[in-house]
């Protein structure tokens, strides 16, 4: 039974993580994260300036209000430490609603991205999204591993700025 996007709780908690909807007090953490080449170098449009990050935060807050889903800031529950972002967004290329995640490099190998991505994917499907995609560079083995581990399957590819991009999907 679909609960509808606007009826879904906005904060998600997993065993180790809290996923909080975007809020102005998260801006300093987001500026650091989105300016880091090791984190955002793989993301669509690459690293961001502080001004662009502020604009994106404002857009993310509005997106939640309009769509009832969006990007969360990810925190470790035990310590409250900001780990990165994870969520659902409408891809600008028209491919559909996409799962995305970007966590600090020191989070790699601990299962945080997998845990956050699984929670976001489940949220989207519980809220009634029938198809959710994700896109990863062919060379980004870590992201590809997360996507397959949470049950997404490869369904296509395209080229972007000289890179082979793989499209994954989850259908409900």
Image (cartoon, rainbow, N blue to C red):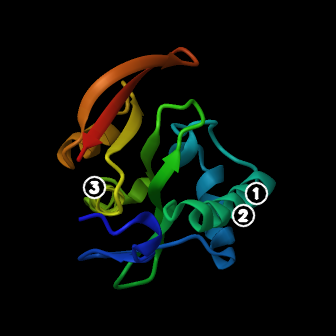
Q: CA distance from mark 3 to mark 2?
A: 26 Å
x and y, in percent, of residue 36 in the image: 60, 50
Q: Residues within 10 Å of mark 3 (few under 14, many from 20)?
A: many
Residue depicted at 39% across the width and 73% down the height: 8
x and y, in percent, of residue 143 in the image: 34, 41
Is 102 above or below relative to 37?
below
User: In front here: 171 or 79?
Assistant: 171
Q: Residues within 10 Å of mark 1 (few under 14, many from 20)?
A: few
Q: Which residue is the site of mark 2?
A: 58
Q: Residues within 10 Å of mark 2 (few under 14, many from 20)?
A: some
Residue depicted at 40% across the width and 77% down the height: 9
x and y, in percent, of residue 107 in the image: 37, 59
Q: Quadrant of residue 64?
A: bottom right
Q: Which residue is the site of mark 3?
A: 114
User: In front here: 49 or 105?
Assistant: 49
Is 38 above or below relative to 51?
above
Q: CA distance from mark 3 to mark 1?
A: 27 Å
Q: Which residue is the site of mark 1?
A: 55
Question: Is 161 situated left or right of 137 in this image?
Answer: right
Residue depicted at 31% across the width and 33% down the height: 168
Instruction: Answer yes or no: is residue 141 visible.
Output: no
Question: Is 40 situated left or right of 145 in this image?
Answer: right
SS for callout 2: helix
| Outermost residue, right side | 51
Quick one: label 3 or label 1, which is nearer the N terminus? 1
Quick one: label 3 or label 2, which is nearer the N terminus? 2
Q: CA distance from mark 1 to mark 2?
A: 5 Å
Residue depicted at 47% across the width and 70% down the height: 6
SS for callout 1: helix
């Amino acid at each position: 039974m679909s609960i509808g996007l606007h009826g879904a709780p906005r904060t998600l908690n997993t065993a180790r993580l809290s996923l909080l909807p975007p809020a102005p007090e998260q801006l300093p953490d987001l500026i650091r994260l989105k300016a880091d080449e090791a984190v955002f170098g793989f993301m669509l449009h690459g690293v961001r300036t502080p001004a662009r990050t502020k604009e994106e935060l404002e857009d993310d807050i509005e997106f939640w209000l309009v769509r009832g889903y969006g990007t969360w800031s990810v925190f470790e529950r035990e310590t409250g430490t900001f780990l990165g972002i994870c969520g659902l967004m409408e891809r600008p290329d028209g491919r559909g609603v996409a799962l995305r995640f970007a966590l600090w490099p020191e989070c790699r190998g601990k299962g945080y991205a997998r845990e956050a991505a699984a929670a976001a994917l489940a949220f989207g499907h519980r809220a009634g999204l029938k198809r959710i995609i994700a896109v990863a560079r062919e060379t980004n083995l870590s992201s590809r591993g997360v996507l397959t581990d949470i049950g997404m399957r490869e369904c296509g590819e395209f080229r972007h700025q000289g890179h082979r991009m793989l499209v994954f999907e989850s259908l409900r």
